Amino acid sequence: MTDLRVISHCVVGTPCYISPELCEGKPYNQKSDIWALGCVLYELASLKRAFEAAPKIVEALLGYEIAQAACGASHVLALSSEGEVFAWGRGDNGRLGLGNQEPHSSPQLVPLPAGYEAQKVLCGIDASMILTSGHQILACGSNRYNKLCQDRTVSPGEPLPAVAAAAADQIQSYDSGKS
C-alpha cells in the first residue's frame, strides 16, 4: 500500500514559470506554485509573456570588440579584445572595481593596476575577478569568507592581486562559487 502521508512534488510549466527559489536551489514549496500561477494569470490577462524581452545594444560598447562577458547577480563585466575591462550594475562592496561603491547603469572602464592585462573576467554574486595574461588573478568586491584571498575584511573597491606571486604563474583557469 502507498503511504498517504507522502506528498508528490512537481514543477509545472516552462522555465519562465520556475520560481526564483527553485533557481537558487531552495526546496520546492507552495511559493513555487504561486509564482507559476501568477505568471500564467499575467499572460492570460495581458496577452503578453511574463518575461518577454528583446536584446538591446549596449551603445557605450559599440566601438569595442567584446571578447567575453560575465554576469553576476546584479553586475556585469565585459572584456574587450584589447584587454580592457568594462563594468556596470550595482557597485556595493566595490564589486565593479571602480574604486567606489556607486552603481552604474552603463559600462565604465575599470582601471587595472599598471602592468596587468586582462585575459578573462568572472563575476560572482558580489565580487569580480580578472585573470591576467601573466596568469595572476585580480579581485574586487566582497571578501566574505576570504573568497578573494586578499587577507582583509574591508573590500578595496578596486582590483587587487588575489593570490601570492609565488603561485600566480601556475593559474590557468578559475571559477566562482555561489558565495
Image: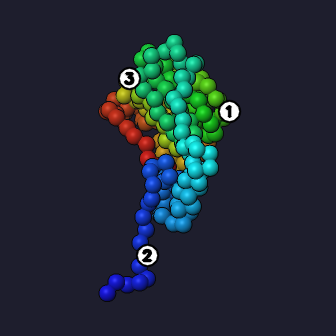
Residue 150 appearing in the image: no
Q: Position of residue 152 (x, y in %)?
A: 56, 42
* Res 117 → quadrant: top left
Q: Position of residue 173 (x, y in %)?
A: 34, 35
Name the kind of residue labelled 2 in the image.
Ile
Q: Which residue is mark 1?
A: 102
Name the kind of residue labelled 1 in the image.
Glu
Q: Earlier in the sequence, mark 3 or mark 2?
A: 2
Task: Compute the Cα span from label 3 to label 2.
Answer: 54 Å
The 10 Å Cα crowd at callout 3, few under 14, some 14 to 19, many 20 or more, is some
Task: Compute the Cα span from label 1 to label 2.
Answer: 47 Å
The 10 Å Cα crowd at callout 2, few under 14, some 14 to 19, many 20 or more, is few
In the displayed structure, would residue 39 be above or below residue 156? below
Q: Secondary structure at mark 3?
A: loop
* Res 86 → quadrant: top right
Give 103 or 65, whichever is nearer the viewer: 65
Residue at the bottom extreme? Answer: 1
The residue at 47%/64% (across/down) is 27
Q: Position of residue 174 (x, y in %)?
A: 37, 38
In the displayed structure, would residue 12 be above or below residue 2? above
Q: Nearer the viewer, mark 1 or mark 2?
A: 2
Q: Position of residue 176 (x, y in %)?
A: 43, 42
- Give the position of the N terminus as an image quadrant: bottom left
Q: Which residue is mark 2?
A: 7
Give 23 or 64, whichever is nearer the viewer: 23
Residue 121 appearing in the image: yes
* Res 171 → quadrant: top left
Task: Compute the Cα span from label 3 to label 1.
Answer: 28 Å
Name the kind of residue labelled 3 in the image.
Ser
Q: Which residue is mark 3?
A: 133
Residue at the right extreme? Answer: 102
In the displayed structure, would residue 9 be above or below residue 116? below
